[in-house]
Image (tube, rainbow, N blue to C red):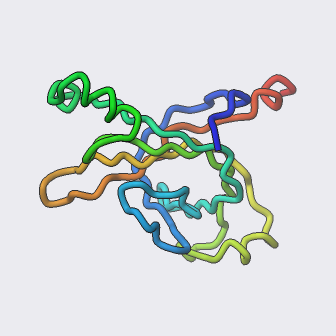
Amino acid sequence: MTLSDNYISLHFLDQPIEPIFDTPPALEKAPDCPNGFLWEGKTYRVSEALSAWTDFKRRGKMARNMQPEHAAVASNRGSLNVGRYYFRVRVMLSSSSTPVRPAVELLDEQEDEQIFDIYYDRAMKNVDNRKGQWFVYREMQNAEAAGAG
């Protein structure tokens, strides 16, 4: 999957989310697209993964702690606790109060669809929490639909 340019940003969000995986990812620091996520008390199920991309740019103090030749290699494949995995997803908001439901059960319900860019940031939060964090980055809209409305 690659990044598609057929979408425009509606809202910048950059808020933490809790991912939902029907099967836990094999590599925690290099995850696949989640099957859904919890955000602001609501459950969103991914109905379609539209694109995926990575950004291994070193930020902040991490940008200054590596030799240039090593930094060039790391920018392509990442390094420990550095990098983001982005996913553009079409989601359905679950009307159920049950936090996690199989996607099959949601297919028969009337749902509102939205498109979001979400990402996993591999940076550890602190020494006691070495796992990265998931975020909803922005809400997107198909550029053709935006022009029609």
Q: How many marks?
A: 0
Front residue of this view, candidates 70 and 127: 70
Residue extending farthest right: 148
Residue extending farthest front: 69
Q: Where 40 sits versus 23, above or below?
A: above
Q: Position of residue 123 (x, y in %)?
A: 27, 46
Q: Is residue 148 left or right of residue 3?
A: right
Q: Is residue 65 left or right of residue 58?
A: left
Q: Position of residue 31 (x, y in %)?
A: 45, 57
**Which quadrant of the view contains residue 131?**
bottom left
Q: Quadrant of the C terminus?
A: top right
Rendered residue at 33%/32% (across/down): 73
Front residue of this view, candidates 47 and 4: 4
Q: Where 12 sits versus 22, above or below?
A: above
Rendered residue at 58%/73% (across/down): 97
Q: Quadrant of the N terminus?
A: top right
Q: Where 129 sits versus 15, above or below?
A: below
Rendered residue at 18%/25% (across/down): 67
Q: Position of residue 3 (x, y in %)?
A: 63, 35
Rendered residue at 25%/47% (across/down): 80
Q: Where 124 sits versus 66, above or below?
A: below
Q: Is residue 17 left or right of residue 34?
A: left
